[in-house]
Image (cartoon, rainbow, N blue to C red):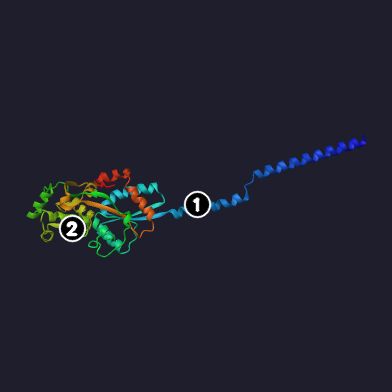
């Protein structure tokens, strides 16, 4: 009987010890569940630094050289693009295509070139005819080059149109009679070159007209536009798009027979360090959604 009682005590004590051990283990698990693992806590700041570093690496600045006649449209589209692509910063340089060509040739940083004439692009393209690219310049990634827009060469008049000029024929008669003043672009800018073709079409001598005081010049299309807007001349030959932007009246537009088509070529330059991003922006400009911005001011998209 004593033996049985002794055995029962041993069994009860054993159960008590087991029960006590079980309770202690459970408490320890619960305490650990409230702690943040050391490895997780130590890696969180490093992860944030890595994300920040990646964002900085993805930030890209694209420098776009574009004809002055694109100032309003590209500024609007550029702002929209940067809103959609916060890691891209677009820096525009708007000038005459001839000036932009010279700046590129002389070593200016540039990712994209959009010219108001084929000549200035050809002068930088090694694949162009040697009679145009006479210096053998090689700046254009030829596989990225395409024609993006068409414009029109317009005859614009100031408010009131006191000289009563309503067509290119009226311009011809007024210049021949020496009773009007015309503003045109210099011979090294596309709008000036188109004007020279129009004068030649009418068999008018530019040099003689200039000597007679019948012509004033502008270093780019915006300068010519300003002369017309301020009424310092009787009329000016500018792009249809610039006349729209300045609120000027267009009385006539030149035909292809008079001066050829006004085609704007665009290309990524081989001096760019951001070819992929530059091509993406050019692709954006050719999307249907952007056509309305160009058409609003008188451009005709060619995509």
Which residue appears at 68% of the width and 44% of the height? 31
Q: Quadrant of residue 91?
A: bottom left
Which residue appears at 65% of the width and 43% of the height? 33
Most distant residue in the left direction: 177
Q: Is residue 87 visible?
A: yes
Query: Judging from the image, what secondary structure is the residue with disc 2 in?
Result: strand
| Quadrant occupied by the N terminus | top right
Lower position in the chain sequence, tag 1 or tag 2: 1
Which residue appears at 33% of the width and 45% of the height? 287
Query: Judging from the image, what secondary structure is the residue with disc 1 in?
Result: helix
Q: Is residue 181 visible?
A: no
- Residue 133 position in % (x across, y down): 25, 62
- Residue 79 position in % (x across, y down): 35, 48
Where residue 51 is drawn, which disc sits there?
Answer: 1
Q: Which residue is mark 2?
A: 217
Total number of numbered discs in the rendering: 2
Q: Residues within 10 Å of mark 2 (few under 14, many from 20)?
A: some
Distance, label 1 to label 2, CA atoms, is 54 Å
């Amino acid at each position: 009987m004593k033996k049985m009682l002794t055995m029962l005590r041993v069994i009860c004590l054993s159960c008590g010890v087991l029960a006590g051990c079980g309770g202690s283990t459970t408490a320890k698990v619960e305490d650990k569940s409230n702690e943040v693992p050391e490895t997780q806590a130590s890696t969180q700041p490093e992860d944030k630094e890595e994300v920040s570093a990646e964002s900085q690496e993805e930030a890209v600045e694209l420098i776009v050289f574009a004809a002055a006649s694109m100032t309003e449209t590209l500024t609007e589209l550029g702002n929209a693009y940067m809103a959609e692509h916060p890691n891209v910063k677009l820096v525009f340089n708007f000038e005459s295509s001839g000036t932009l060509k010279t700046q590129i040739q002389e070593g200016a940083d540039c990712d994209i070139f959009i010219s108001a004439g084929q000549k200035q692009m050809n002068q930088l393209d090694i694949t162009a005819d040697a009679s145009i690219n006479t210096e053998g310049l090689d700046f254009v990634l030829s596989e990225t080059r395409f024609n993006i827009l068409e414009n029109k060469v317009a005859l614009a008049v100031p408010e009131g149109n006191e000289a009563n000029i309503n067509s290119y024929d009226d311009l011809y008669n007024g210049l021949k009679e020496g009773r009007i003043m015309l503003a045109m672009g210099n011979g090294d800018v596309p709008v000036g070159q188109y004007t020279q073709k129009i004068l030649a079409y009418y068999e008018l001598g530019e040099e003689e007209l200039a000597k007679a005081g019948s012509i004033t010049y502008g270093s780019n299309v915006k300068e010519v536009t300003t002369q017309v807007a301020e009424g310092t001349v009787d009329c000016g030959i500018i792009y249809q798009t610039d006349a729209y932007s300045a609120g000027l009246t267009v009385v006539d537009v030149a035909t292809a027979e008079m001066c050829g088509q006004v085609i704007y070529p665009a290309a990524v330059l081989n001096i760019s360090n951001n070819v992929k991003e530059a091509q993406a922006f050019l692709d954006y400009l050719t999307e249907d959604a952007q056509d309305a911005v160009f058409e609003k001011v008188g451009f005709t998209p060619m995509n």
